[in-house]
Image (cartoon, rainbow, N blue to C red):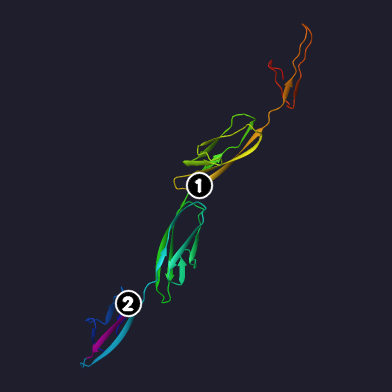
Amino acid sequence: TATLSVTTNATNYIWSGGSTAATQSINTATAGNQTFTVTVTNANNCTNTATAQIIVNELPTASVQGSTVCLNEVVTLNVTTNASKYIWSDGSTNATLIVNTTKAIIQAFTVTVINGNGCSNTATAQVVVNELPTVSVSNSTVCLNEAATLSVSTNATNYIWSGGSNATTQTVNTATTGNQTFTVTVTNANNCTNTAMAQVIVNDLPTANVQDLTVCLNETAALSVATNATNYIWSGGST
């Protein structure tokens, strides 16, 4: 809004637009130059004229694209503008703003841009930070050829294991001793992902060998086990 005021010792006024008030309100809805003339008349019916020019400058352009991301994902807001000065709602004066995504919240960011004529404009962007899905898999220690299955605990609906399976469980090959590492990546409805890792240790079986014996009636016989194990239990219950 702009208003012109006439300074005069006259008592009557008429503006070029026909108004007879001491002030003239200016329509600033369109950029450009406007010229206004006021004619004043005193008690002696003498007149005088004054002219004023109003320059209406364009506002700078301003736009910012919002974003929907997952927790801890990098987000940078960029203002598109023909202005040369910027100030964000957090006080930053750069053309870009790095958003903190360590909390799952909805945030609104406003940037005010100012051009060389001192005219300003604003733009607002919303950043939605979604939670990651929960995911966990327990480690397992088994013996050679023992059945082993890993199960993922998650609130997600899609899964993919490091071996390519997309089932909720992963069957482990235990035909070979050693350590195996399995990774599962889960994805929720917001397309956010999380990963869990589990280790499966497959231990070797102990050696065990007992020699057959042939004895005579009432002859004492003792069986001995050859093994690298430390605990034993015979079929009769002896340890």
Q: Where, quadrant-wise, is the C terminus in this rendering?
A: top right
- Give the percent coordinates (x, y) of residue 113: 43, 69
Q: Is residue 169 visible?
A: yes
Q: Position of residue 67 (x, y in %)?
A: 44, 56
> Would residue 192 appear left or right of 15 to someone viewing this image?
right
Q: Position of residue 231 (x, y in %)?
A: 72, 24
| Left or right position of 13 against 179 | left
Residue 143 is one of the magenta-drawn residues: no
Residue at x-position 27% and y-position 85%: 37
- Residue numbers of the magenta segment: 32-42
Determine the residue positioned at 73% across, 22% down: 209
Amino acid bearing label 1:
Thr
Judge left or right: residue 32 versus residue 205: left
**Residue 222 to residue 144: above or below:** above
Query: Mark 1 — residue?
Result: 193
Q: Which is more N-terminal, label 2 or label 1?
A: 2
Asked which secondary structure carries label 1, the reply is strand
Determine which residue is flagged by label 2.
2
